[in-house]
Image (tube, rainbow, N blue to C red):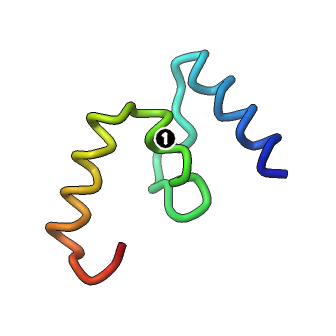
């Protein structure tokens, strides 16, 4: 099932779209955030998460 979702995330990215448009990515779609946004923006996401929610990863 993960491999199918991984292929779908590739297609979504190829079309210039995002997995989530009007809601958060959460645990389910969050695993593809680095692929969707790139390593620089993903690092910023991690820093923001650590700043505003330091007690969870």
Q: Residue at x 46, y 47 (%)?
A: 22
Relative image position of residue 15 (x, y in whole percent): 60, 16
Q: Residue at x 57, y 40 (%)?
A: 19
> Quick one: SS at disc 1?
loop
- Residue under the point 55% across and 64% down: 27
Compared with 5, 37 (above or below) is above
Residue sitting at the far top: 15
Q: Quadrant of the C terminus?
A: bottom left
Of residues 5 and 15, the one nearer the viewer is 5
Residue 28: image quadrant is: bottom right
- Residue 21 at x, y = what percent? 49, 41
Measured from the top left, where is residue 49 in percent x and y?
25, 63
Which of the pair 20/31 is nearer the observer? 31
Task: Identify the residue at the far bottom of this view.
Answer: 55
Quick check: 5 left or right of 54?
Answer: right
Q: Is residue 32 above or below residue 46?
A: above
Circle 1 packing at 10 Å, graded few (<14), some (14-19), many (20+), is few
| Residue 49 appears left or right of 1 | left
Q: Which residue is mark 1?
A: 21
């Amino acid at each position: 099932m993960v491999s199918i979702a991984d292929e779908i995330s590739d297609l979504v990215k190829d079309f210039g779209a995002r997995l989530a448009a009007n809601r958060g990515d959460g645990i389910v779609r969050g695993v593809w955030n680095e692929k969707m946004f790139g390593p620089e923006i993903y690092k910023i996401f991690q820093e923001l998460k650590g700043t505003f929610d330091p007690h969870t990863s």
